[in-house]
Image (cartoon, rainbow, N blue to C red):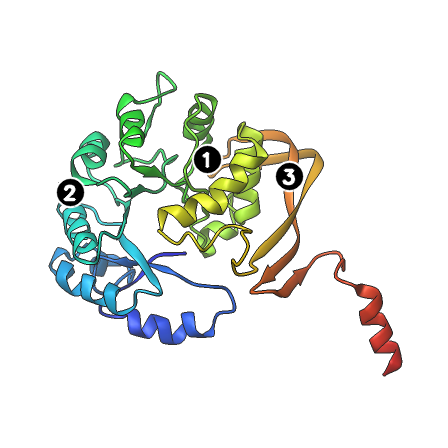
Amino acid sequence: MDAGSPGWRNFQLYKDQTIDHSKTRVLAFLNIIGEGMRGGAYEQDLKDTDPKMAALVARQFHPYIVGFKVAHFEGPDWTIVDHAVEAGKQAGNLPVMVDFGGSIPPLPLEDLLLNHLRKGDILTHCFAQIKGRESIVDPTEKKVKPFAWKARKEGRYFDVGYGGISFSFSQAIPAIKEGFYPDAISTDIHTGSMNNAMKDMLSVMSKCLVMGMSLQQVVAASTWQPAQIIKRPELGSLSVGAEADIAILNVLNGNFGYFDYTGYKINGKQKLACEMTVRGGEIVYDLNGIANPIVVAKKQTEH
């Protein structure tokens, strides 16, 4: 799931150069900024938000676009979120994912979650503790703030969206200890995160596992639950008739260390590893040669 790289102005280009050439299925949240994630001033141009055009593009490319994204915008109010929500309504009630860049002083998350977002909308980077953004866990009390529990009860979703600096154990450990588990586990993978504390999807899943989520909860939050959030119930399961997208995982036992971008480290006894990946019924990754290696060897001998 791409969380906001293209906007309505350049989604066709994104489809042509990325989606159409990828073996991995790529779906997208359309950036409410028309130019998408171009960086710098482009992502701060509130005039480049057009709910009507964004909704039209989302309808045009409905097999690929599953919602709208607010990303990196820094401002004194939630206007850009309101624009994304309006696009979601016009596009057939698609969900909105919010990664607000920040504001000094920080804008109240309670207002965002309860007064601007709707049932089915998503707060990503839910375990972030960053200057300019309010956190969901009180850093002094080490407790999840009441409004977060209320927002969850009213149907808002909380996504990990690990990223480069958008996950801290100071938020995640107290939340998970209290039973405030993420609805979706995700990476926010990019060159700045994959080469630092985040690493990959299995690393993020492993951290959630060692922090106290059960294996079943970790798997559900990585597959079936995200599929429901983006309203694609045909994905994320091994149901009869579903496309054969399968990850075969191994739970390794030993002594493993996990750290966040602040340098805080926890130790765990388990780590997830991928043995095999099947995409659309085709084996695309096989770590230990478990897919009939004898047959492969025989064919090579015959030649």
Residue drawn where x is 55% and y is 55% of the image:
240
Task: Calculate the distance from the C-alpha at mark 2 to the C-alpha at mark 3.
Answer: 39 Å
**Kind of element beneath mark 3:** strand
Residue drawn where x is 13% and y is 41% of the image:
77
Q: Is residue 105 visible?
A: no
**Kind of element beneath mark 1:** loop
Q: Which residue is mark 2?
A: 78
Q: Which residue is mark 3?
A: 271
Residue drawn where x is 31% and y is 43% of the image:
122
Q: Which mark is residue 262?
A: 1
| Type of the residue with mark 2 | Trp
| Type of the residue with mark 3 | Lys
The mark total stands at 3
**Kind of element beneath mark 2:** loop
Q: Is 209 positioned to the left or the right of 139 in the image? A: right
The quadrant in which the N terminus is found is bottom left
> Tag 2: Cα neighbours inside 10 Å, few (<14), some, or many (≥20)?
some
Point out the tag, 1 or 2, that comes first from the N-terminus: 2
Q: Position of residue 128 (x, y in %)?
A: 37, 36
21 w.r.t. 192: above or below: below
| Type of the residue with mark 1 | Thr
Q: Position of residue 55 (x, y in %)?
A: 19, 61
> Tag 1: Cα neighbours inside 10 Å, few (<14), some, or many (≥20)?
few
Point out the tag, 1 or 3, that comes first from the N-terminus: 1
Q: Which mark is residue 103?
A: none
Task: Calculate the distance from the C-alpha at mark 1 to the C-alpha at mark 3.
Answer: 21 Å
Q: Residue furthest bottom?
A: 303
Q: Is 43 positioned to the left or the right of 258 in the image? A: left
Task: Calculate the distance from the C-alpha at mark 1 to the C-alpha at mark 2.
Answer: 29 Å
The quadrant in which the C terminus is found is bottom right
Residue drawn where x is 75% and y is 56% of the image:
288
Q: Nearer the viewer, residue 194 or 293?
A: 293
